[in-house]
Image (cartoon, grey):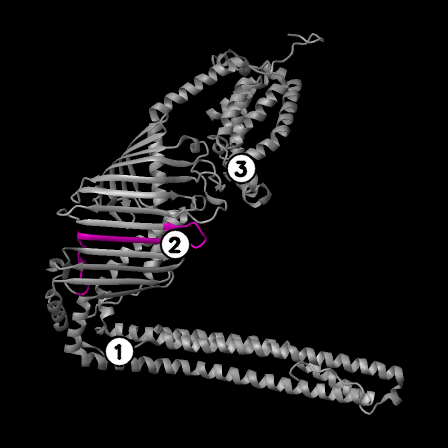
């Protein structure tokens, strides 16, 4: 329940931030990697770095992480199959993986694991659709519900909370 | 900064975002310092336990990142075959790794130091059994299957005067089971041949040919005209082609029928082979003592011998799993995590480093146990990808320290997985060693060979096993087991007297065959003496009982196999008769068609002959 509330609060804060729809959407698309792919992997460190240093919504990234975790769990069998196809069945790619797995540094990406590779490829493929979908959603929200929510008591209470200050560090 | 339209240009980078990131990294670094080594130690112990199929304990771990060195203290590996015992305990292991391969997730050991090793120690708490998927549990299962295949005879010492009459259940006899299976096979062959015979469509071919012959009866070129004669000749040729085709099908059926019946005949021979096992089974029911030295030797030393070889089979099976030949991508289960583990595929390049490589280790280990002294251990090319190194893994352990618990020990071994034909060789020789005591089955005595010499040679070449364990001792002593003490019958007393009078041991146990069909042969001076005494005292009576047993088995087997033999004979004669009949009918039709053709052409055209016609 608390997690859901936090997510809701985060969602509202993000939607009402000063960030442009593009910045929020980029944060969501990047943050989706954290949820869709197994977290303890090198590419996610890169995603976190990008979320921090790129002028995108960090909060949106964190929100997307939370939202995409259950989706990641749900689609793990699919990622596993996709990764297995790429690593084992697609013989034409074998040279690429062999080179990848034997280059210092790149081998640490764990892309030789079916779930990691499958989920990363799926995330990359979904990056642009997620971006545009999120952007459209933010624009539609701000044009329709945004003002009404802004006038609500819940939003005002949220806006006044101390946590908002922490959040505002990463505000785009 | 503003653009020409006056709109503020959005920054791409937000460098101040690095500050919380750095803070996050600092927190992670503190957590690493506090819990990192403990986490690595637990992970290493868990992975090692899973990999080796036996509990691996690590007391302490010290990681020196800058020096790429790991120091482990209090390392203990449980015996996979005895959970209350450790194979070894090592007080300190220092492993220095080459840094560059670590970036490729590869481990190349530069230096290895081992200090204070103890072997065969008792565990304070029993080790946890390793279950689940993985190489080690499957190797253990393979070894259990391997050991179950040995047919170790019982040392039966039932007195002759209490031998009961034998009541055999035919269904328990292997030859009867084989006969019943063969009868079923014979029925299947019969049905298959019937079906193939029906598939020849002989009647259709013959009827069609006969109809054509009848239609052309009494015709000639004058009555049919030139065009009619040409069509008739074509019809005759087509009919003849159908007959030829049917003949070819018949010849194919001949081959099939012969092969099937020959296979059934081979089944009859297998019944005769199974009968030998039935003699042993029936003799076992009567608990007749065996005079055969190898039987007695296997009964006394079979278990202890198999225990020795099963260790060798386990470790070689594991070595084959972890260091298979070739460089094809290898699939292993992914890391344990909340998310699905998936499969990790290892891609290997011939020019790169293997995933694990210990180029060379020369370690002198001072033993802290009763077997004190210095052991020299050497190993080279220990790797997970032998195809990359191109050299077999070699290892050796040497020790010489007269006057201690173990005078000398020499172990040499080779694991050659560099080509598709994998081969492992282990030779071990120990002198002045305390030999294992053996509880004599069926008698309340334990044999204690004392100190002596032991040699073990084990070769696994593909699936072919060859092994020999030889033991010599001149300090053989016997103890009565208070726990198993009871009143002995005449034969048992005799054997006990013979055994306890022997104070020397010369044992040779040979394992041969394949992993799926291993054979054990044990010879020792004990079984020769026991066999001689048994033969002298009770030979005649036992021989009579054995003859009776054989006669009873023969009677049952003959009774059950006679109908099967008759069925196979009938099948052979019936199939030959039907084939001969088919050949005759088709030849007759071919002859008639030939006559018609000659009659139509005035003897100028004849039908071509099939080979063999």
Asked whether, in this view, residue B600 is left or right of residue B209, the answer is: right
Q: How many marks?
A: 3
Classify mark 2: helix, strand or loop: strand
Q: Mark 3 points at which residue?
A: A99
Q: Gap in Å between the C-alphas at discs 1 and 2? A: 47 Å
Are dots 1 and 2 on a single chain?
yes
Direction from residue B538 to residue B212 in the image, left or right: right
Mark 3 Cα within 10 Å, few/some/many (few <14, many 20+)? some
Quadrant of the rendering where the N terminus of chain B is positioned: top right
Chain for numbered disc 2? B
Secondary structure category for the residue under label 3? helix
Q: Name the residue under label 2.
A: B423
Q: What stretch is highlighted in magenta?
A: B415-442
Q: Mark 1 points at which residue?
A: B166
**Left or right relative to B411: residue B434:** left
Per the model, the C-alpha gap separating discs 1 and 3 is: 71 Å
Against B149, residue B244 (above or below) is below
Q: Earlier in the sequence, mark 1 or mark 2?
A: 1
């Amino acid at each position: 329940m608390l997690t859901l509330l936090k997510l809701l609060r985060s969602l509202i804060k993000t939607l009402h931030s000063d960030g442009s729809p593009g910045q929020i959407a980029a944060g969501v698309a990047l943050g989706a990697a954290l949820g869709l792919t197994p977290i303890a992997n090198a590419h996610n460190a890169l995603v976190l770095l990008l979320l921090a240093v790129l002028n995108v919504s960090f909060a949106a990234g964190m929100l997307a992480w939370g939202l995409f975790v259950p989706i990641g769990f749900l689609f793990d069998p699919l990622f596993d199959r996709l990764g297995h196809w790429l690593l084992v069945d697609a013989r034409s790619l074998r040279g690429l993986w062999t080179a990848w797995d034997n280059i210092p540094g790149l081998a640490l990406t764990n892309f030789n694991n079916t779930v990691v590779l499958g989920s990363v490829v799926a995330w990359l493929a979904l990056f642009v659709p997620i971006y545009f979908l999120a952007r459209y959603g933010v624009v539609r929200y701000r044009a329709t519900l945004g003002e009404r929510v802004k006038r609500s008591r819940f939003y005002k209470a949220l806006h006044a909370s101390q946590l908002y200050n922490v959040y505002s560090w990463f505000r785009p | 900064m503003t653009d020409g339209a006056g709109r503020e240009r959005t920054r791409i980078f937000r460098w101040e975002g690095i500050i919380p990131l750095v803070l996050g990294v600092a927190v992670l670094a503190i957590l690493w310092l506090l819990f990192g080594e403990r986490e690595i130690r637990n992970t290493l112990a868990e992975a090692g336990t899973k990999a080796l199929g036996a509990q691996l304990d690590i007391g302490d771990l010290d990681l020196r990142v800058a020096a790429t060195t790991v120091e482990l203290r209090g390392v203990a590996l449980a015996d996979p075959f005895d959970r209350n015992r450790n194979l070894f305990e090592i007080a300190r292991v220092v492993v220095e790794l080459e840094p560059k391969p670590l970036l490729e997730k590869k481990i190349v050991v530069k230096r290895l130091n081992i200090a204070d090793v103890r072997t065969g120690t008792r565990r304070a708490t029993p080790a946890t059994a390793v279950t689940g998927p993985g190489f080690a549990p499957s190797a253990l299962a393979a070894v259990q299957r391997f050991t179950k295949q040995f047919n170790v005879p019982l040392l039966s010492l039932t007195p002759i005067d209490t031998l009961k009459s034998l009541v055999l259940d035919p269904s328990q006899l292997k030859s009867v089971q084989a006969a019943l299976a063969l009868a079923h096979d014979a029925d299947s062959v019969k049905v298959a041949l019937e079906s193939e015979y029906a598939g020849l469509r002989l009647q259709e071919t013959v009827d069609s040919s006969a109809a054509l012959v009848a239609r052309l009866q009494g015709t000639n070129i004058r009555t049919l005209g030139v065009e009619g004669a040409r069509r008739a000749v074509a019809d005759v040729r087509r009919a003849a082609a159908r007959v030829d085709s049917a003949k070819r099908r018949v010849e194919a059926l001949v081959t099939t029928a012969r092969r099937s019946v020959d296979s059934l005949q081979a089944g009859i021979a297998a019944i005769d082979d199974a009968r030998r096992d039935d003699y042993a089974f029936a003799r076992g029911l009567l608990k007749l003592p065996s005079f055969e030295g190898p039987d007695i030797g296997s009964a006394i030393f079979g278990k202890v011998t198999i225990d020795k070889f099963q260790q060798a089979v386990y470790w070689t099976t594991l070595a084959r799993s972890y260091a298979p030949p070739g460089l094809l991508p290898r699939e292993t289960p992914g890391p344990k995590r909340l998310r699905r583990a998936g499969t990790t595929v290892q891609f290997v390049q011939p020019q790169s480093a293997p995933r694990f490589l210990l180029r060379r280790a020369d370690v002198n280990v001072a033993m802290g146990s009763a077997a004190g002294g210095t052991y020299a251990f050497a190993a080279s090319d220990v790797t997970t990808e032998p195809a990359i190194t191109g050299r077999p893994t070699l290892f050796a352990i040497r020790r010489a320290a007269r006057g201690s618990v173990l005078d000398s020990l020499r172990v040499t071994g080779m694991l050659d997985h560099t080509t598709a034909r994998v081969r492992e060789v282990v030779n071990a020789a120990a002198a002045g060693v305390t030999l294992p005591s053996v509880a004599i089955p069926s008698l309340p005595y334990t044999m204690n060979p004392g100190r002596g010499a032991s040699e073990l040679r084990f070769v696994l070449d593909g699936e072919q096993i060859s092994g020999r364990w030889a033991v010599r001792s001149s300090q053989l002593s016997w103890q009565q087991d208070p726990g198993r003490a009871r009143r002995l019958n005449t034969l048992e007393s005799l054997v006990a007297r013979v055994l306890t009078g022997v104070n020397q041991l010369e044992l040779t146990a040979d394992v041969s065959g394949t992993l799926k069909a291993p054979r054990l042969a044990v010879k020792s001076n004990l079984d020769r003496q026991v066999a001689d005494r048994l033969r002298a005292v009770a030979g005649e009576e036992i021989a009579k009982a054995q003859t009776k047993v054989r006669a009873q088995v023969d009677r049952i087997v003959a009774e059950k196999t006679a109908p099967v033999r008759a069925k196979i004979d009938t099948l052979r004669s019936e199939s030959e008769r039907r084939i001969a009949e088919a050949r005759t009918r088709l030849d007759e039709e071919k002859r008639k068609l030939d006559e018609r053709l000659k009659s139509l052409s005035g003897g100028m055209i004849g039908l071509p002959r099939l080979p063999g016609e």
